[in-house]
Image (tube, grey):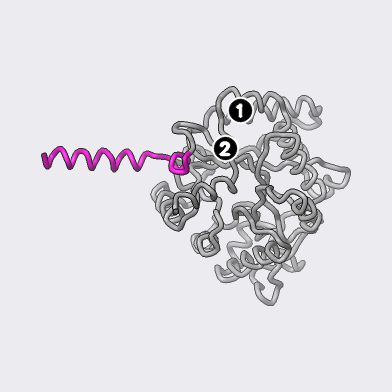
Amino acid sequence: MRILLLFLCLFFSIKGQSQSYAEKLGYPKDAKVLILHIDDVGMSYDSNLGAIKAMEEGVANSLSMMMPCSWIPGFFKYLEKHPETDAGLHLTLTSEWDNYRWGPLAGKPAVPGLVDKEGALWPSVMATATNASADEIETEIRAQLDRSRSMGWEPTHLDSHMGTLFAKQDFLMRYLKVGMEENIPVMFPGGHNSMIMETAGSTGLTKEMTTTIGEQLWAAGLPVLDDLHNISYGWKGTDGMSKSDLQRYKTEKYIESLKALQPGLTMVIMHCTWPTEVFEHISESGQTREGDLLAMMSPELKKYIVENNIVLTTWREAKKRRDALKK
C-alpha cells in the first residue's frame, strides 16, 4: 500500500508539472493559445495607425506603448474611446534611431546613467547595460508607469523594448519586482519555452531559471507565458516587394511558425506600422513592419487560425482568469 501511495504521489506530481500555464488558466488542454501582440505603439504616428488597423481590421489583439515617445498622447485619445483595448507598457530604456530620439521620463538628474551625450536614452542595449544601474532602471520603469496612470490608463501588462530588461540579471529582477508589487502581468516565458529557447540565442537564462521565475510569478498571482514568439522582425523579404507579395510572404512565414509552436500560452510579438513618407526618415524597418500589418489583415492567416482551432486571448483576459483562481 505504501508503495502504491508513493507511486500515485509521484504520478500526480509529474502530471502537475507537465500542465501548461494555459491549462492552469482554464484554456483547452493541448490548445495553442496566442496573444497576437504589437510592439512600439506611440513611437510615431505611423506606428499608431498600423496598430489600430491591425486590431480593427486584422487579427492582432494586444499591444504595448512606448511612454517616452512623442505620439503617446495621440494614442491615448484612441484609448479613451476604446477602453477595453489590451494595452500595456513597452518599457523603454533605449533610443535607437539616429535622427528621432527620446529621453527618460524620470529626467537626467534622477537617472544619469541612462542618458547619452544627446540627452536621450542610450542607442543600444549594450550601452544601457554598461552605463545604467539597477536602481536607475527601476526608477525609469516606475516613471513610465506613473505617466500611464497619470493619463488615466492602468496597463494590462509590462514588456521590454529591445529586450533591454533581459540584458542583466539585476535589470530583470527589478522588472519582475515592479510587476509583482504592482500586480501587473509581465512578459516572461516561464513554461516549456520551446520556441524562445531555440530562436533567442544566448540570453544567459537557463531552462531551470525560467521555470523558477515562472513559478514565482504564478505564486504572486500573475498569469505566466508558456512560450514567446519573437522572430518576425527578421522576416524582411526582398527590397521593393509589392504590397501583395509582401503580404503573401509575411503571411506564409507566420503560418509556418505557428505550425511549429507547441501548445500553451504564447505571446507572438510583431511591429505593425502603416508607413507614411515620414517613416523612412525614422527607420529603415518600414517594409518588415508594414509586412506584419499586412499579415495580420490577411484572410489566409485568419482562416488558418480558425481552421486549426487556435485560441486567441489577451493579457487582460489571462489576468481575469488568474484572479478568478485566487477566489
Residue at position x 64%, y 67% in the image: 140
State whether residue 312 is above or below residue 279.
above
Residue at position x 71%, y 51% in the image: 83
Residue nearest the viewer, comparing 34 with 135: 34
Q: Earlier in the sequence, mark 1 or mark 2?
A: 2
Q: CA distance from mark 1 to mark 2?
A: 10 Å
Q: Residues within 10 Å of mark 1 (few under 14, many from 20)?
A: some
**Quarter occupied by residue 179:** bottom right
Q: Secondary structure at mark 1?
A: helix
Chief secondary structure of the magenta span?
A: helix
Count all numbered tags in the image, as a single digit. Answer: 2
The residue most toward the bottom is 109
- Which residue is tagged 2? 34
- Which residue is tagged 1? 305
**Quarter occupied by residue 289:** top right
Q: Residues within 10 Å of mark 2 (few under 14, many from 20)?
A: many
